[in-house]
Image: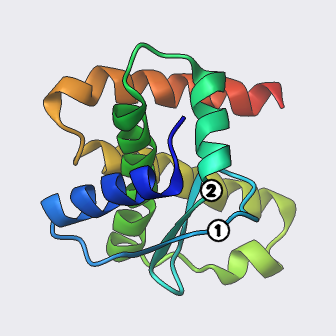
């Protein structure tokens, strides 16, 4: 099991390695393992959700590498919002079809942009997590 300080170290090391100026914080009310808040430029994580996600996905990767894979996906949101100026008002005021389209675009971009930072030895695992994550979402 990974604890808050383990995950914080992984986040800090990864952000430093890529010279990314993103804040991070633990949030035990978060209902997902990690998220990115564009308005505060903050990655939030819940260590219990992270550990639960690791047990659901079940891959032959170290827990540390698995957290990195999750983190690269979340950093992908940061990169997407830096490169694309999405009209986020759509999420609040758009019709259902517009909302789903924008969410799908942001999600695809996050996976794609996050992949650009993944070290070569973790690329196959990243792609597998993406595949399993999509299957997990569809089953819920």
Q: Badge 1: few (under 14), some or many (20 or more) residues near its Cα, within 10 Å? A: some
Q: Residue at x 63, y 79 (%)?
A: 88
Which residue is painted at 80% across and 24% down in the image? 139
- Helix, strand or loop at label 2? It is loop
Task: Give the number of marks.
Answer: 2
Position above or below: 103 against 123:
below
Find residue 116 and report its horizontal and vertical position in percent: 23, 46
Q: At numbered mark 1, what does the secondary structure look like: helix, strand or loop?
A: loop
- Work out which quarter of the rendered image holds the C terminus and state it: top right
Please report contact status of discs 1 and 2: CB closer than 8 Å, yes or no.
yes
- Determine which quarter of the picture holds residue 68: top left
**Could you say which is closer to the camera, residue 73 or residue 98?**
73
Q: From what the image shows, is residue 27 above or below residue 60?
A: below
Residue at 17% x, 37% y is 119
User: How far apart, in angstroms, are the residues tagged by discs 1 and 2?
Assistant: 5 Å
Badge 2 is on which residue? 46
Say above or below: 47 vs 56. Answer: below
Question: Which residue is disc 1 drawn over?
Answer: 27
Instruction: Pick whichever, 91 or 6, lies toward us.
Output: 6
Where is residue 113? Give x, y as percent. 33, 52
Which quadrant would residue 96 be assigned to in this image? bottom right
Which of pointers 1 and 2 lies earlier in the amino acid sequence?
A: 1
How was the colour assigned to the protein in this rendering? rainbow
């Amino acid at each position: 099991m990974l604890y808050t300080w383990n995950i914080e170290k992984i986040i800090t090391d990864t952000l430093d390695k890529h010279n990314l100026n993103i804040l991070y914080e633990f949030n035990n009310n978060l209902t997902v393992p990690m998220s990115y808040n564009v308005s505060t430029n903050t990655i939030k994580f819940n260590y219990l959700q992270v550990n639960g996600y690791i047990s659901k996905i079940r891959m032959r990767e170290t827990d540390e590498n698995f957290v990195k894979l999750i983190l690269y996906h979340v950093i992908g949101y940061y990169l997407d919002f830096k490169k694309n100026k999405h009209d986020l008002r759509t999420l609040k005021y758009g019709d259902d079809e517009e909302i789903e389209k924008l969410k799908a675009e942001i999600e695809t971009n996050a996976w794609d942009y996050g992949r650009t930072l993944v070290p070569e030895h973790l690329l196959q695992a990243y792609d597998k997590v993406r595949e399993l994550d999509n299957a997990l979402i569809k089953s819920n």
